Image (cartoon, grey):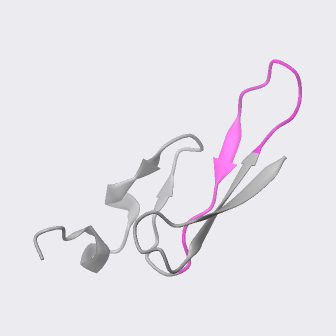
Amino acid sequence: MDWTLRCPLCVQGSIKREKDSTPGFKESSMWSCGVCGLSGDGVYVELNTAKPQFRDQSS
């Protein structure tokens, strides 16, 4: 089972998430956004994976 979600950081790209459908098997994979590079561990996105210009929240 897989989903393609709009990137919550840059809103221009998308992130694909894939989850194994085997009963009792909780592994999942997450691809990075093609625009800002945001990725994660399969469950949560991690801001430190994004390109530096997208991580800067001071502006």
Return the x and y of residue 34 as percentages of the image width and height. Answer: 56, 78
Start-end of magenta stretch: 19-34
Instruction: Left or right? Give the position of 22 relative to 33.
Output: right
Return the x and y of residue 7 as percentages of the image width and height. Answer: 51, 67
Instruction: Left or right? Give the position of 5 relative to 59.
Output: right
Q: Quadrant of the C terminus?
A: bottom left
Question: Which residue is at the front of the view, 5 or 35?
Answer: 5
The quarter of the displayed image where residue 36 is located: bottom left
Instruction: Left or right? Give the position of 39 relative to 9.
Output: right
The residue positioned 45% from the left and 63% from the top of the image is: 8
In the image, farthest residue toward the right: 22
Q: In this view, does 37 lie above or below 47?
A: below
Instruction: Left or right? Give the position of 36 relative to 26.
Output: left
Q: Is residue 37 above or below residue 46?
A: below
The residue positioned 60% from the left and 44% from the top of the image is: 42
Most common SS among magenta residues: loop
The residue positioned 19% from the left and 71% from the top of the image is: 56
Disc tally is 0
The quarter of the displayed image where residue 24 is located: top right
Q: In this view, does 1 lie above or below 31?
A: above
In the image, farthest residue toward the left: 58
Residue 38 inside the magenta-drawn segment: no
Return the x and y of residue 2 as percentages of the image width and height. Answer: 79, 52
In the image, farthest residue toward the top: 24
The residue positioned 84% from the left and 46% from the top of the image is: 1
Question: Which residue is at the front of the view, 39 or 3?
Answer: 3
Return the x and y of residue 31 as percentages of the image width and height. Answer: 62, 61
